[in-house]
Amino acid sequence: MHSDLRLKGRFKHRIETMKDSSNLSKKLIIIYSLLCAFNLLLHHNGFAQTETAEFSKAIILSDEGRYDDALVILNIIVSKNPDFYRAYLAMGMIYSAKGHYKEAILNFDKAIKGMPDSVHGYLKRATAHFYIGNYNQAISDLEIAAKIAPDNDEVWNSLGIIHRKIGNSDKALNYFAKSIAIQPNDPESYYNRGRIYAEKSNLDEAFLEFSKTIEIDPRYAKAFQGRGSIYKSRGDHNKASINFEKALGYFNESINHNPNDAQLYLDRGQLMIDMDKFEQAIEDFTKAISLDHQEAYYFRALAFEGKNENENALSDYNHAIEFNPNHAAAYNGRGILYDKKEDFRKAIQDFKKALQINPNFKEASMNLKYVQDRLLATLKVEVPS
């Protein structure tokens, strides 16, 4: 019984974590934000026409997934004019898209220093902090953004995502409700609210929220994925397959249009895991890694686990932790592998580290208690009568 509960908790955390990876900064949001920055720049006095033209070229390159080429141009711009703060903002967004969140934060710092009222700057820096486990810093940035722009629905939606992540689901629901009140036709907050209901095992409410998301945006792949997961959990494999295939079709279309976008391969790989297609998931995560998205190591570890290739999974967890020492989910995943190898002390270390990073990490707490009990059982020595 204890082992079954542990495995169930592991599965729940797997789904929860995977949804986070692409929700807070999708490519369309990145490119839209860059274009907004450029439009603002056209009305900003003091910059040469060549600089604005080069900035526009960098945005187009990033839209094509040519992030490194865009960064070269943006670095040249700021080397000539260090006060071109929107270039720092653009570089921060590109580094985030590449999964290089520490470099992103350094550039957002420079952008915010020159543009202290930039809602985009605080929003995007919060995103980067979120992905490396700096939840308090992320919340602080979003609270500043909320004071600057209290009617910005993205701010409240992002606050909801972070509070859900750290276990404050009721507070998260309140933030999603605020976002919906401001922008009732934005699918994001309905989708995120559905995730919370799914985590609470309130599947009927979750299904309604995912369906509302699809009503607003009939091509919202992750909402179809969410509905597919609900049908799968209920044993309705036919309807699960229909929804998963819908999601897959939309992901495929996006990849065909943007073949160099690492995030899209990350998204499709997560769907492949939900569909129990682990080999295809590994291929997508490997492609994302080849495009320099470091977070893909964590997700590829999950796929390797699905194939019982535990040594490969362990190697990828190590990569994920090396890249992001605050990756609580990676420590939890690696701890489970150490438990399977009956290396209980290393497992306990990893679960404790996960809880140090995120004290509300319920699955890590459950796993820690489980392994501690296993270790105690091995240490008991019968005294001869």
Image: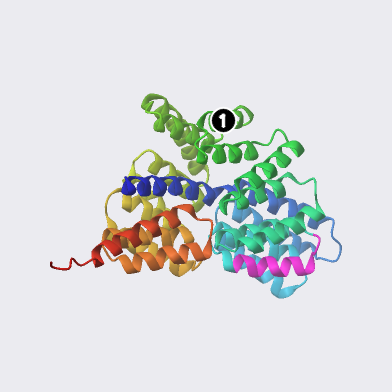
The answer to whether residue 327 shows anywhere in this view is no
Q: Badge 1 local density, few (<14 within 10 Å), some, or many (20+)?
A: some
Report whether 249 appears left or right of 59. left
Residue ID at (39%, 58%): 369
Image quadrant for the N terminus? top left
Q: In this view, does 168 lie above or below 222?
A: below
Image quadrant for the C terminus? bottom left
Residue furthest out toward the right: 45
Residue ID at (76%, 59%): 144
Residue furthest out toward the front: 385
Q: Give x and y (percent) for residue 285.
A: 41, 52
Residue 34 in magenta stretch: no
Q: Give x and y (percent) for residue 234.
A: 40, 29
Q: Along the line of sight, which residue is nearer the eye, 333 or 151? A: 333
Give the colour scheme shown: rainbow
Q: In which quarter of the image is residue 235?
A: top left
Magenta stretch, residue numbers = 103-117
Q: In which quarter of the image is residue 352?
A: bottom left
The answer to whether residue 192 shows anywhere in this view is yes
Report whether 62 appears left or right of 19. right
Q: Give x and y (percent) for residue 123.
A: 69, 56
Residue holding disc 1: 205
Q: Hey, what amino acid is under mark 1?
A: Glu
Q: Along the line of sight, which residue is nearer the eye, 223 or 264? A: 223
Residue ID at (84%, 56%): 43
Q: For numbered disc 1, what is the local secondary structure? A: helix
Residue 105 in magenta stretch: yes
Q: Give x and y (percent) for residue 329.
A: 46, 57
Residue furthest out toward the left: 385
Q: Main secondary structure of the magenta part?
A: helix
